[in-house]
Image (spheres, rainbow, N blue to C red):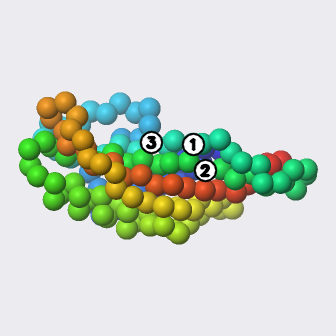
């Protein structure tokens, strides 16, 4: 499994969130409509850990998956926070995303501190810690 597989699996699960604003994935041009919410997903892989050596060794892959929820500025926090809660409900701690023989487990999901971007957007980030185990020979 490679990191693009992890990204695709998490993006696919994220897309199941009811009412999710238009989602812009990594390295795609974001052209949000002024005044309309939108979301951006980013995979942040960490260095893998070797849990065993030799032909049957296992590697632990882990990292963060961050979903930034952008809402128009100056309209309060209720809508953005409600969407953050729906995202965390779709990818809760302990949830395993499966695709064929590949598995990615969410080990933690949490809402981070909101911030303003420019004078147009209020952003609420949701961050997920994920882990996946793979044969070192694969």
Which residue is at the far right?
Answer: 54
CB contact under 8 Å: marks 1 and 2: yes
Q: Which residue is mark 3?
A: 42
- Counting the numbered discs, the total is 3
Give residue 49's position: percent from left, percent from top. Answer: 72, 48
The answer to whether 115 is drawn above or below residue 62 in the figure is above
Q: Judge whether residue 116 can be spotted in this image.
A: yes
Question: Which circle's residue, 1 or 2, is located before the other in the chain?
Answer: 1
Q: Which residue is mark 2?
A: 62
* 3D distance between C-alphas at marks 1 and 2: 6 Å
Please identify, in this view, whether the residue under mark 3 or under mark 2 is nearer the observer.
2
Question: Which circle's residue, 3 or 2, is located before the other in the chain?
Answer: 3
Residue drawn at the location 22% of the way across and 34% of the way down: 117
Q: Which residue is mark 1?
A: 45
Give residue 42's position: percent from left, percent from top. Answer: 44, 42
Q: Judge whether residue 16 can be spotted in this image.
A: no
Mark seen at residue 1: none
* 3D distance between C-alphas at marks 3 and 2: 14 Å
Q: Nearer the viewer, residue 9 or 112?
A: 112
Residue drawn at the location 74% of the way across and 51% of the way down: 59
Give residue 79's position: percent from left, percent from top. Answer: 17, 57
């Amino acid at each position: 499994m490679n990191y693009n597989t992890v990204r695709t699996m998490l993006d696919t699960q994220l897309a199941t969130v009811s009412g999710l604003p238009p989602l812009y994935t990594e390295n795609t041009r974001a052209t949000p409509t002024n005044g309309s919410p939108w979301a951006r997903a980013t995979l942040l892989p960490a260095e893998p850990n070797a849990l065993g050596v030799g032909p049957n060794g296992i590697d632990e892959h882990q990292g963060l998956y961050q979903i930034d929820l952008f809402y128009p500025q100056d309209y309060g926090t209720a809508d953005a926070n409600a969407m953050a809660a729906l995202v965390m409900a779709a990818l809760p701690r302990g949830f395993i995303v499966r695709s064929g023989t590949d598995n990615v487990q969410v080990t933690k999901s949490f809402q981070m501190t909101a911030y303003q971007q420019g004078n147009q957007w209020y952003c609420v980030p949701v961050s997920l810690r994920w882990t996946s185990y793979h044969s070192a020979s694969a």
